[in-house]
Amino acid sequence: MKLVVAITGASGSLYAQRLLQLLDEDPQGPHEVHVALSTHAREVAMTEVGKLALPDRFQVHGDDSMRVPFVSGSAKFDAMVIIPCSMGTLGRIAHGYSDSAIARAADVFLKEKRRLILVPRETPWNLIQARNVVTLLEAGADVIPAIPSFYHRPETVLDVVDTVIARVLDHLGMKHTLIKRWMEPEETKD
């Protein structure tokens, strides 16, 4: 799979770090992954998880240059995940305001009808944010708020994180055994 994983300055760096780790270790791979970091992504990550762990083989890009391969419709990518996605980034994408590489890439993925997954980590939402989410859903994006589930009784923070990452991987069409499926017997995970 050829992917863009964008990390914004929203809280929730652990979600991005876990997704990148799983993509790097995926037995279905190797995947070509381009990581796009917003201006504040590393700063927030440093506060939350220490230094952001980025797999060496993944290409890392800043957000201030359009000289990256994923901002043109002629470049073939399978999917883009913005995780965590700030509500500011979500709003700019919803309104076609492509002022950065991340927002431009998201615009391209929408216009080319490619999979675009946004994982906002914000609560509560105001009416403007809710309308922006609806706009993106209507445009074809998948919005997976970072809202974990608890029916499988997670025991660690990573278990909780994995409930969200499992949904992202599901939407990417990737097999995994991160969580027990609802009403699935213990011994028959994916």
Image (spheres, rainbow, N blue to C red):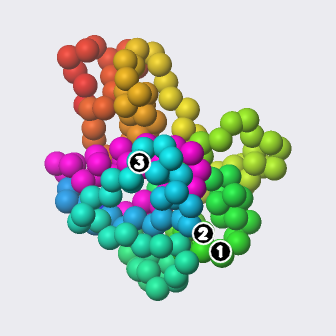
Location of the N terminus by quadrant is bottom left
The residue that mark 2 highlights is: 103
Q: How far apart are marks 2 and 1 (CA)?
A: 5 Å
Distance CA(mark 2)–CA(mark 3):
26 Å
Q: Name the residue under label 1.
A: 98
**Local secondary structure at mark 2:** helix
Q: Which residue is drawn at 75% across and 40% down?
A: 125
Q: Which of marks 3 and 1 is nearer the N terminus?
A: 3
The answer to whether residue 100 is above or below residue 89 is: below
Q: Can residue 8 be seen in this view?
A: no
Give amino acid for label 2: Ala
Please tell me which residue is depicted at 54% across the width and 65% down the height of the picture. 38
Name the spot of residue 6 as percent of width and height, x first: 48, 61
- Above or below, comparing residue 108 to residue 41 in the picture: below
Q: Which of the labelled discs sits on residue 68, or is there none?
A: none
Residue 21 included in the magenta stretch of the image: yes
